[in-house]
Image: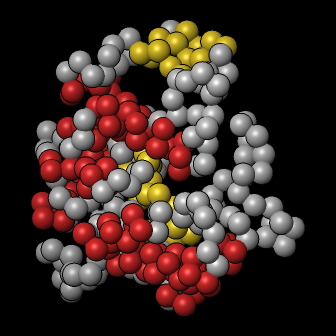
Amino acid sequence: MIASGIATGLGDEWIRFGATSEHTADGSFSERTMALNKTYPGVEPPYQGNIIETQNDLNAWVERVHRGGIQVNCHANGDVAINMVLTAVERAQQLFPRSDARPKITHCTLINDDLLRRIKAAGVVPAVFTSYAYYNTDKFHFYGEDLMKRCMAFRSFLDAGVPAAAGSDFSPGPFDPRMGVQGMVTRTGWNGQTWGANQRISVEEALRINTINGAYNSHEEAIKGSITSGKLADFVVLADDPHTVDQDKIKDIEIVRTVVGGSTVYTA
Ligand SMILES: [Zn+2]
């Protein structure tokens, strides 16, 4: 594809070549294998998760894709892996500056102030777990409350002006954006446990992350992401207002109509 000059953006609003699939930098959040800069709490022998490749190999892959005009997309969960991806992205931009490249970090789960500053400076677009805050709360004890305060850090991203988007991680996580919004707003799971409540955001913010920020993430904000004159009329009609319904019931709001390109394709 690189040799033939195919770059991000080729296609139309139905099928388009976007970012790469996830180039994996570390392990998984839910399987307790993401790369941490300290040992996992309570795990013997001491363990810090998995790194997939060397910094040099990651640098080479990011540079090749970036130079080819293709939107980089790396899977990175732990702070160690996010640091490695940022190092590779910063290096590629320095060698071959390309405006509005929007390198993508899928998951971008565990951050700190320094990583956040570099994400903002590099124009990185994170696509962060949404439904996990509802669906995976029984796994959050792997990390403990101190780390969960910096995981799936939507409040921190928005406060820093980073256009974080919604990442369902389907099929490991449910894709339903209603469950995603509920988890982002409440940080409370199916089992009643609340983790990292400091990262709660408003319903309005969660809806923007699930719509316009996703469109920005894929360079499609001119045609998608809001119900605006001149954009594609793709939207759903909900039976209740997510702003006013009980926040623990957002995931249960019924979809009564689905409209694609201005035409109704589903009616309840
Ligand atoms: Zn992934």
Judge from the rendering whether residue 46 lies leftward or rightward of residue 211; answer left or right.
Answer: left
- Position in image of residue 151 (x %, y %): 26, 59
Determine the image quadrant of residue 239: top left
Q: Is residue 55 visible?
A: yes
- Position in image of residue 56 (x %, y %): 54, 90
In front: 138, or 61? 61
Q: Is residue 189 visible?
A: no
Q: Could you tell me how many numbered marks the image carries?
A: 0
Judge from the rendering whether residue 63 lies leftward or rightward of residue 17; answer left or right.
Answer: left
Residue, x 14% and y 47% (percent of image)? Answer: 197
Q: How is the image coloured?
A: secondary structure
Residue, x 48% and y 38% (percent of image)? Answer: 212
- Position in image of residue 254 (x %, y %): 39, 16
Look at the picture and state if 259 lies above or below 26.
above
In front: 100, or 35? 100
Look at the picture and state if 81 lies above or below 135.
below
Judge from the rendering whether residue 238 lies leftward or rightward of residue 20; answer left or right.
Answer: left
Judge from the rendering whether residue 197 lies leftward or rightward of residue 169; answer left or right.
Answer: left
Look at the picture and state if 104 lies above or below 3.
above
- Position in image of residue 265 (x %, y %): 64, 15
Residue, x 72% and y 46% (percent of image)? Answer: 16
Tell me the quarter of the image containing the N terminus: bottom right
Residue, x 52% and y 67% (percent of image)? Answer: 74
In front: 89, or 45? 89
Look at the picture and state if 133 lies above or below 207.
below
Determine the image quadrant of residue 140: bottom left
